[in-house]
């Protein structure tokens, strides 16, 4: 913190949209020190979309370079996914050498939902044939309680990231949908068994959180337990909720829909079946929760329907195709690969 003492230093955080504005308690800093300023109020987004945050600091002293006292960041709220990474693979990874471990990301879930799967990106040093299991843990006030697991997943060569850029994620489905109550603290974890298995979870140095980020369970430590890896890189482990349980799995939807081909290039055919006549709206969300396409299909009769979805202008990536009737909703995962 600079070359001289700094007094009465405060952080102001503003968020738009939403009109959030809050100031941290004042702190004093000695030269070349590191510390954290935290505003008093937690910001809870009102809905899906992108939010822009401006952080600015003030203090009693005159700053020779005030331009670096302000920084702008943004984050997105997705309808069906929690994530801490920025989606860009840069070669980084996290692991526990040859020992068994579980690497997990912490998420706060404000509304009751169900978890269907995790998306995970594996770093290039991961060995083909290694086995992992996905877990969901919730905090009971004393400890993290395992609420459900996936079947063992064997990693193939196609699952491993080898090139810097947009990260390649693998979806691992849980054996059953896992209910989460509102206002829950949740860990989304990937377990590796060590030994001959070498599993590196991709991580990004561009996304760091000072207080709480990726957490590791180390069963072979001197004191086995969960350890917070605060200030370190963030693991690429995403949690998928509600209707997002994989490309071909829509078992929790109240009406059936599918897309083909999937992955798609220029277009996909969307097929759906209505139990009764209803107005239907089609919405496509990207991985950030942003709407990239919307169309009111009008009143559709009961029975089978199909339409062509043009994906030529969509960037390569993963999308959620949502069909909403007056009383029902179907969400299908679409992969676009140009």
Image: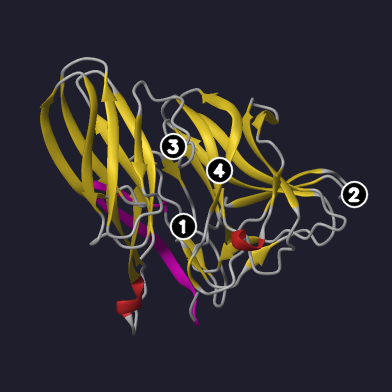
Q: Are marks 2 and 1 in contact (CB under 8 Å)?
A: no
Scheme of image coloration: secondary structure
> Can you name the residue that lies furthest to the top here?
276
User: Of circles 2 and 1, which is in front?
Assistant: 2
> Given this view, does label 2 or label 3 mark the residue nearer the observer?
3
According to the picture, the residue beneath numbered tag 4 turns out to be 118
Q: Nearer the viewer, residue 307 or 296?
A: 307
Left or right placement of residue 300 versus residue 157 in this view: left
- On the image, the x and y values in percent for residue 256 come to 35, 27
Mark toward the start of the polypeptide (1 vs 4)? 1
**Residues at badges 1 and 3 in contact (C-beta under 8 Å)?**
no
Q: x and y percent of residue 332 in the render?
A: 37, 38
Q: Earlier in the sequence, mark 2 or mark 1?
A: 1
The stretch in magenta equals 3-25
Q: Which of the two discs, 2 and 4, labels the residue nearer the N terminus?
A: 4
- Which residue lies under the disc numbered 1? 37
Instruction: Look at the numbered disc 3 and give the secondary structure of its residue.
Output: loop
The quarter of the displayed image where residue 143 is located: top right
Mark 2 to mark 1 CA distance (whole Å):
33 Å
Q: Nearer the viewer, residue 303 or 201?
A: 303
| Numbered label attached to residue 222 | 2
Inspect the magenta stretch and tell me whether residue 5 lies in it: yes
Q: Do we see residue 270 in this rendering?
A: yes
Residue 244 tag number:
3
> Which comes before the other along the chain, label 1 or label 3?
1
Vertical placement of 21 versus 143: above or below?
Answer: below
Q: Which residue corresponds to the image point at 69% horizontal and 30% vertical from the top-left?
A: 146
**Compared with residue 105, is residue 55 higher up or lower down, i.e. above or below?**
below
Q: What separation in Å lies between label 3 and label 4 (alpha carbons)?
A: 10 Å
Which mark's residue is nearer the viewer, 2 or 4? 4
């Amino acid at each position: 913190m600079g070359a001289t003492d700094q007094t009465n230093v405060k952080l102001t955080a503003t968020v738009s949209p939403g009109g959030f504005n809050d100031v941290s308690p004042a702190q004093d800093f000695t030269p070349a020190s590191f510390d954290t300023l935290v505003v008093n109020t937690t910001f809870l987004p009102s809905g899906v979309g992108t939010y822009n945050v401006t952080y600015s600091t003030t203090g009693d002293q005159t700053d020779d370079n005030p331009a670096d006292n302000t920084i702008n960041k943004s984050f997105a709220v997705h309808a069906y996914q929690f994530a801490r990474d920025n989606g860009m693979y840069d070669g980084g990874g996290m692991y526990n050498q040859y020992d068994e471990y579980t690497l997990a990301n912490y998420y706060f879930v404000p509304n009751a939902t169900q978890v269907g799967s995790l998306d995970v990106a594996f770093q290039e040093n991961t060995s083909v044939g290694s086995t992992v299991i996905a877990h969901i843990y919730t905090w009971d006030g004393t400890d993290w309680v395992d609420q459900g697991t996936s079947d063992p997943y064997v990693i193939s060569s196609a699952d491993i990231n080898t090139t810097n850029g947009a990260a390649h994620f693998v979806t691992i489905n849980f054996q059953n949908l896992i209910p989460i109550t509102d206002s829950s603290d949740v860990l989304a974890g990937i377990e590796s068994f060590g030994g001959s298995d070498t599993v590196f979870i991709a991580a990004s140095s561009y996304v760091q959180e000072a207080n709480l980020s990726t957490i590791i369970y180390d069963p072979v430590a001197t004191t086995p337990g969960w350890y917070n890896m605060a200030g370190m890189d963030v693991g690429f482990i995403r949690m998928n909720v509600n209707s997002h349980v994989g490309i071909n799995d829509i078992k929790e939807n109240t009406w059936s829909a599918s897309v083909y081909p999937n992955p798609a290039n220029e277009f996909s055919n969307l097929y759906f079946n209505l139990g009764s006549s209803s107005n239907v709206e089609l919405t496509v969300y990207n991985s950030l929760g942003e709407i990239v396409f919307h169309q009111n299909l009008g009143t559709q009769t009961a029975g089978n329907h199909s339409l062509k979805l043009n994906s030529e202008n969509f960037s390569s990536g993963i999308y959620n195709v949502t069909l909403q009737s007056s009383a029902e909703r179907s969400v299908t995962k679409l992969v676009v690969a140009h």
